[in-house]
Image (cartoon, rainbow, N blue to C red):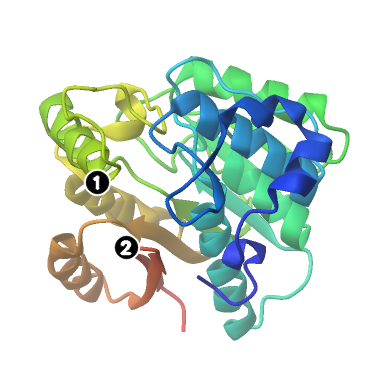
Amino acid sequence: MHPKNLHNTPYQFKKLLEKHTALAPFIITNEFGNNTIDFANPIAVLELNKALLKVHYNVKHWDIPKNYLCAPIPGRADYVHHLADILNNENVINNIKGLDIGVGANCIYPILGKTIYNWQMVGADINETAVTNAKQIVAANTNLIDSIEIRKQNSNANIFTGIIKPNEKFDFTMCNPPFHSSEKEATKGTQRKLKNLGKQTSELELNFGGMANELWCNGGEGLFLKRLIKESVLFKNQVTIFTSLVSKSDNLPKLQKQLTKLKAIHFIIPMQQGNKKSRILAWKFNA
């Protein structure tokens, strides 16, 4: 993990329980005698997130609708810290404003951007329930109200268009795109995840949840990112640097080729949490 990520050390369950007693029933002892939770249990993951947000980020009121994506916070914090490094390298330091594409019902990235670095954040999503819930989270926490705005994307054909306003400036955009191209592919991914967690592969409940628009889209991650890059050209004078997570390394060559063709300066930052490897793809149009 990023050296600034406070989740580099094991979870402090005693401290978490002091702020969030609802986590207690889900704490178990693993084979090494350490406290942990069952990460295949979506309710346990939800309660852990609530505790982490209370203790480390002063977010006292946070919840998501049933079956929506319960984003693991340590990995999300890593993306935010790497973004801060990118902005620092671009000499973007003060009054930073960012846009999260696909904010989801959990609103995690705007929350972390605000609470860790005091960024102004806009979160955008096409799903009505996600937008409504994200707005409720912001409204319920006084430390978020003045720093986070949630906007709804009303067109399936657009990503940035209709979200970024005329003459509006962003220092960065971020995105965690849907991984899969279909429900069938997402189900196979879930089976692999459950097997890795020592569960029967017939147990198809997602340990981190996730609705259709959060987990898959036509063409999967690769096509979504091609669309994202293509549309980013239209906003090259309004955004300093565009970024996205890329889960599947096989998608990188085509994306890099597209960026080169568009004359975009681009680079890749590797990320890893445990056995999970990912990377940030970043690009800009102005040297």
Q: Which mark is residue 150?
A: none
Q: Is residue 201 above or below residue 237?
A: above
Q: Is residue 57 visible?
A: no
At which x and y percent is residue 212?
30, 23
Residue shown at the point (54%, 45%) measured from the top left: 36
Q: Are marks 2 and 1 in contact (CB under 8 Å)?
A: yes
Drawn side of residue 22 relative to residue 80, left or right: right
The secondary element bearing badge 1 is classed as: helix
Q: Quadrant of residue 122?
A: top right
Residue shown at the point (44%, 43%) measured from the top left: 160
Sequence order check, earlier mark of 2 and 1 = 1
Q: Which residue is mark 1?
A: 196
The secondary element bearing badge 2 is classed as: loop
Q: Quadrant of residue 59?
A: top right
At which x and y percent is residue 146?
84, 40
Residue shown at the point (45%, 23%) measured from the top left: 68
At which x and y percent is residue 192?
18, 41
Residue shown at the point (86%, 41%) measured from the top left: 143
> Can you tell which of label 2 and label 1 is closer to the viewer?
1
Q: Is residue 283 visible?
A: yes
Q: Which mark is residue 275?
A: 2
Drawn side of residue 46 relative to residue 232, left or right: right
Drawn side of residue 183 relative to residue 151, left or right: left
State the residue in front, 128 or 106: 106
Q: What is the spatial separation of the Cα atoms under label 2 and label 1, in whole angstroms?
A: 11 Å
